[in-house]
Image: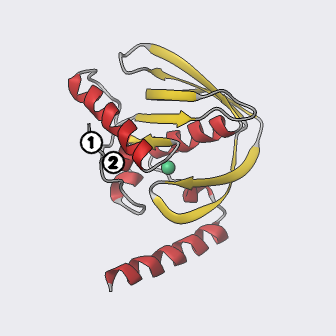
Amino acid sequence: MAVLPIREHPDAVLKEKAKPVAEFDDELQALIDDMFETMYAAPGLGLAAPQIGRSLRLFVYDLKEGDDHPRHTGVLINPEFVSKSGTQTGEEGCLSVSDYRTQVARANKVAVRGLDRNGKEITVEGEGLMARLLQHEMDHLDGMVFVDRLSSLKRQMYLKRLKKRIKAEAR
Ligand code: NI
């Protein structure tokens, strides 16, 4: 297993629509193990394949047990939403977006159908923080990061900060 480097927004791979996983082979198993290790090392609650430079439709997650929810952990491959309901607004951050967290509007309850690491069909349901996590990771598979969900004014403020940071790092 290995901790892989995490790609930073605005890396091009984070903007691509990722391709479905076709082979459930040893290479995929190793990739999933590496993604878990990378997520725990970061540390983060979720990690999608584009974030480590692989444009594939899968993500891993581990949301620890909280006051209002059990532990949710696993991998979802080629996932699709089967339902979305309600609304919530809460703070969000991303391992690919340094030094920036902000409020993002999301559905409050979702169900996602996909495959597990053996290619077996599974449905994962989430409410509150788990629903937010699932929607955040699903966005990564479609080439979006949470800042793409902000109002244009907030997005512009973020992009200004990002430009400043890239300039400072180039010095
Ligand atoms: Ni993220």
Judging by the rendered image, the residue that carries numbered circle 1 is 2
What's the coloring here?
Answer: secondary structure
Q: Is residue 118 above or below residue 19?
A: above
Q: Position of residue 29 (x, y in %)?
A: 29, 26
Which amino acid type corresponds to the residue marked 2 in the rendered image? Answer: Ile
Please name whichever residue, 154 or 64, is drawn nearer the observer in this view of the structure: 64
Q: Say whether residue 7 is left or right of residue 123.
A: left
For disc 2, does the CB lie below 8 Å from ligand 1?
no
Q: Which residue appears at 64% of the width and 41% of the height?
A: 132
Give amino acid for label 1: Ala
Residue 164: % across, % down: 47, 81
Residue at 52 percent across and 28 percent down: it is 73
Compare marks 2 and 1 and give the one earlier in the sequence: 1
Percent x, y of residue 62: 52, 34
101 sits left or right of 57 in the view: right
The residue located at (46%, 45%) in the rendering is 140
Q: Quadrant of the C terminus?
A: bottom left
Percent of width and height locating residue 64: 59, 35
Alpha carbon of mark 2 to alpha carbon of mark 1: how far? Answer: 12 Å
State the mark number for residue 52: 2
Along the line of sight, the residue nearer the viewer: 154 or 44 = 44
Density class for disc 2 (Cα within 10 Å; few <14, some 14-19, many ≥20) is many
Please rate how many residues cluster around mark 1, counting C-alpha atoms within 10 Å: few if below 14, some from 14 to 19, many from 20.
Answer: few
